[in-house]
Amino acid sequence: MDIRVGTTDACESRLTSIVTKCPKCGNGGTFYPLQSHDLYIYVEGMGSPYTVGHRVCPNDGCKAYLFFCKHPAISLITFPSLRIDFKTENIPDRIRLSLEEAITCHAEGCYIASAIMVRRTLEELCDDKGIKGDNLKKRIEGLKSVVVLPQGLLEALDELRLLGNDAAHIESKEYDEIGEEEVSTAIEITKEILKGVYQMDTLVKKLKKLKKSKQT
């Protein structure tokens, strides 16, 4: 395989524009270059070159470094990897750690591992609420009787369980595949469930407190 490496000066129009979210602060924008050129790697049979380089977050309060690899045939790859946002206030530690691991696995493209950790998050949620049962299905049924959530999120508990089953057991095939879209959706739903269980009361109390302060 023939591989050639070259650089392009900043004055040339081929200097790559990187528009993305910052893995550190979460803000989006156009990341600016640190030096006068990117590195271009030409691989035989790939047509356009791979572009690699590093950038700086445009947020003045952040300035985090971002390394990247870009090619028309693949999505933008960054290091650190982009992560799904997760507000952790009032989330019990064991539940928080399980979902954070699911998010880390998702960011690194380990989607089966991520789905398993989403399932683990549900198991930790049941434990925290003192729900017993021979299996997760029975425990989720018990959980539904002690948490106050919209009907859609209650139904989603079973869908998350089935996705986790597919990830953990080869013979289970409720989902055609376990990929980025399935797992990112599962994580977003899990975040909403945890928000409803652990964070909504705090938000309502905060709103009421603000109301009283305005009245006085």
Image (cartoon, grey):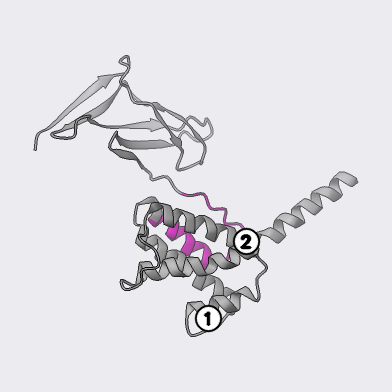
Element at label 2: loop
The image position of residue 160, as x and y in percent, is 48, 66
As for residue 142 lying within the magenta part, the answer is no
Is residue 147 shown above or below 133? Answer: above
Q: Quadrant of residue 49?
A: top left
Amino acid beneath label 1:
Lys
The image position of residue 140, as x and y in percent, is 55, 75
The image position of residue 5, as x and y in percent, is 17, 29
Is residue 111 shown above or below 163? Answer: above
**Few, some or many C-alpha atoms within 10 Å of disc 2 (few <14, some 14-19, many ≥20)?**
some
Residue placed under numbered mark 2 in the picture: 90
Q: Which residues are magenta?
A: 84-105
Name the residue nearer the viewer: 24 or 50.
50
Residue placed under numbered mark 1 in the picture: 138
Is residue 62 shown above or below 118? Answer: above
Work out whether mark 1 precedes mark 2 in sequence or the reverse, and give the earlier one. 2
